Image (spheres, grey):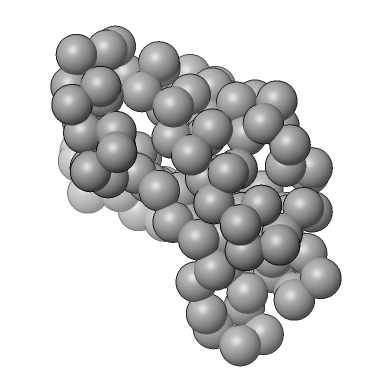
Amino acid sequence: MRITEKAEKLERRRQRVRQRVFGTPARPRLSVFRSKSHIYAQIIDDTRGHTLATASTLDPELKKAAQSKNPIDAAKEVGKLIASRAKAAKVGLVVFDRGGRLYHGRIKALAEASRESGLQF
């Protein structure tokens, strides 16, 4: 399978997920993006187009710890950080947008860590 085919399939899955998942002020969207070496999470209100909270492995609070840990542990730390920042923004309920990726590995670790820290989805 060519790289372009893989990218096209990922984009089709991402669009299919985004058709069903929409963030409202009462229940914003927790969007997750995974690259080869980092993971990013945002809480987005799609009606206004505003990002309410964000966290990633490049965050100054996590950068040192994320480099020394394996990727799944770093994703768990990002999940805990996004949950604490969501609480600061007075967000308790979210809808989960896995970004076209399987609910497995780093995506699953981030989701479960944010659930354990108090986010509901």
Q: As displayed, is residue 26 above or below residue 3?
A: below
Residue 8 as seen in the image, left or right of residue 101: left
Q: Position of residue 53 (x, y in %)?
A: 50, 61
Looking at the rendering, which quadrant does residue 45 occupy?
bottom right
Q: Quadrant of the C terminus?
A: top right
Q: What residue is rendered at 71% in x and 59% in y?
A: 91
Front-lying residue, 35 or 110: 110
Q: As displayed, is residue 115 above or below residue 44?
A: above
Looking at the rendering, which quadrant does residue 29 occupy?
bottom right
Total tally of numbered discs in the picture: 0
Q: What residue is rendered at 54% in x and 22% in y?
A: 109
Front-lying residue, 95 or 10: 95
Q: Position of residue 43 (x, y in %)?
A: 56, 60
The residue sitting at the bottom extreme is 48
Q: What residue is rendered at 22% in x and 49% in y?
A: 4
Q: Quadrant of the N terminus?
A: top left
Q: As displayed, is residue 111 above or below residue 71?
A: below
Q: State whether residue 105 appears in this view.
A: yes
Q: Position of residue 84 (x, y in %)?
A: 58, 44
Q: State whether residue 14 appears in this view.
A: no
Q: What residue is rendered at 54% in x and 83% in y?
A: 49
Looking at the rendering, which quadrant does residue 56 occupy?
top left
Residue 48 as seen in the image, left or right of residue 37: right
Q: As displayed, is residue 84 above or below residue 70?
A: below
Residue 46 as seen in the image, left or right of residue 68: right
